[in-house]
């Protein structure tokens, strides 16, 4: 067992034979700063949704998931403390690009649009408002930032330079296909998938989906019945935390502030609700299965 990576939320262990164990913690970050207060069960929600989407997207693109129950894990990771927060995965050669897809204009895409009328080199119609639906989903890649830095939106030309024309085109095609299916599934649950980001790598030259998929950490989920263009909609994701942080007066530099109990509870509630609405399944039921 060898720890090879400790990120803001996940730890990755090399367990041999080209396999990794990803452990998802309850840490939460905002504005690239890890908060000192954890959100109980958050890591299990991220794992649960990722497992759901990996299975849902298998016919579109291969993924790195090998197992998620405790009985699937190497011996050191069969403890109950890991239940629901571990995935056994195939090691990939990860690509240096965040595969972002936007169906709605919000966040950095909205900021870019206000300044240039475009985002990631994709020109958009004039007169759009914040949180407007786009004419069609668009691929707006971003760079993978070094620790402590912010991801930056890049163009398709940058992706071609990093990955080559064929792989870049396949990344765009797969990203849009996965987004469209996830957005349709979310729509049936009364949720708008405003945007999301994917991580991809290659396994023996084959493009493969990795890391996490369409979770509240990597996506913006909005209740469809309260969405109104021209506003920043309420959400089932980290936006609730970001809004509280902005109102608190914190200046977005480390360290982050301690989170009050109501913000912890509100964040957890939104994450769990996203899982249950999207999958149609009890979160507690999934936890029991993951512990087998």
Image (cartoon, helix red, strand yellow):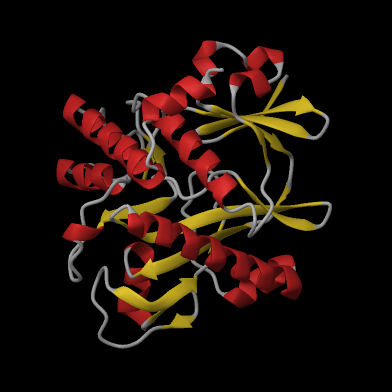
- Which image quarter holds the N terminus? top right
Residue 203 place in picture, x, y as percent: 78, 50
Task: Give percent across and percent down for residue 164.
Answer: 75, 71
Looking at the image, residue 112 lies above or below residue 277: below
Residue appearing at x 27%, y 39% in the figure: 270
Occupied quadrant, residue 65: top right
User: Toward the viewer: 71 or 85?
Assistant: 71
In the rendered image, the quadrant that contains the C terminus is top right
- Residue placed most toward the observer, 43 or 84: 84
Residue 35, by quadrant, is top left
Specify the farthest residue to the bottom: 126
Up-down relation of residue 19 to residue 228 (above or below): above
- Splitting the image into 4 quarters, where does residue 79 fall? top right
Q: Position of residue 52 (x, y in %)?
A: 51, 42
Q: Nearer the viewer, residue 133 or 53?
A: 53
The count of marks equals 0
Residue appearing at x 41%, y 62% in the figure: 184
Q: Residue at x 42, y 34 (%)?
A: 45
| Residue 76 spot, x, y in % from top left | 67, 13
* Residue 152 visible within the image: no
220 up-or-down from 177: above or below: above
Task: Specify whether residue 50 is in view.
Answer: yes
**Is 182 positioned to the left or the right of 61 in the image?**
left
Answer with left or right where residue 205 lies relative to residue 218: right
Left or right: residue 130 versus residue 185 is left
């Amino acid at each position: 067992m060898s720890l090879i990576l400790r990120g803001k939320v996940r730890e990755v262990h090399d367990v041999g034979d080209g396999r990794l164990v990803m452990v998802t913690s309850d840490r939460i970050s905002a504005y690239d700063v890890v908060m000192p207060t954890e959100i109980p069960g958050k890591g299990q929600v991220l794992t649960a949704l990722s497992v759901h989407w990996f299975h849902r997207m298998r016919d579109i693109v291969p993924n790195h998931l090998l197992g998620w129950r405790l009985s699937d894990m190497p011996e050191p990771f069969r403890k109950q403390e890991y239940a629901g927060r571990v995935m056994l995965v195939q090691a990939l050669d990860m690509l240096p690009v965040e595969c972002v897809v936007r169906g709605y204009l919000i966040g950095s895409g909205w900021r870019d649009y206000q300044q240039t009328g475009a985002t990631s080199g994709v020109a958009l119609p004039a007169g759009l408002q914040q949180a407007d639906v786009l004419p069609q989903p668009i691929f707006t890649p971003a760079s993978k930032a070094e620790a402590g830095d912010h991801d930056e939106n890049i163009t398709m030309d940058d992706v071609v330079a990093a990955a080559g024309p064929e792989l870049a085109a396949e990344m765009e095609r797969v990203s849009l296909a996965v987004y469209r299916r996830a957005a349709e599934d979310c729509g049936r649950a009364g949720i708008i998938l405003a945007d999301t980001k994917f991580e991809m790598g290659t396994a023996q030259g084959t493009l493969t989906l990795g890391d996490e998929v369409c979770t509240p950490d990597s996506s913006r989920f909005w209740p469809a019945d309260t969405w109104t263009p021209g506003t920043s909609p309420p959400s089932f994701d980290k936006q609730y935390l970001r809004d509280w942080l902005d109102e608190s007066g914190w200046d977005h530099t480390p360290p982050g502030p301690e989170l009050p109990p109501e913000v912890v509870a509100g964040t957890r509630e939104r994450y769990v609700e996203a899982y249950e609405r999207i999958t149609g399944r009890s979160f507690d039921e999934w936890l029991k299965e993951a512990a087998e």
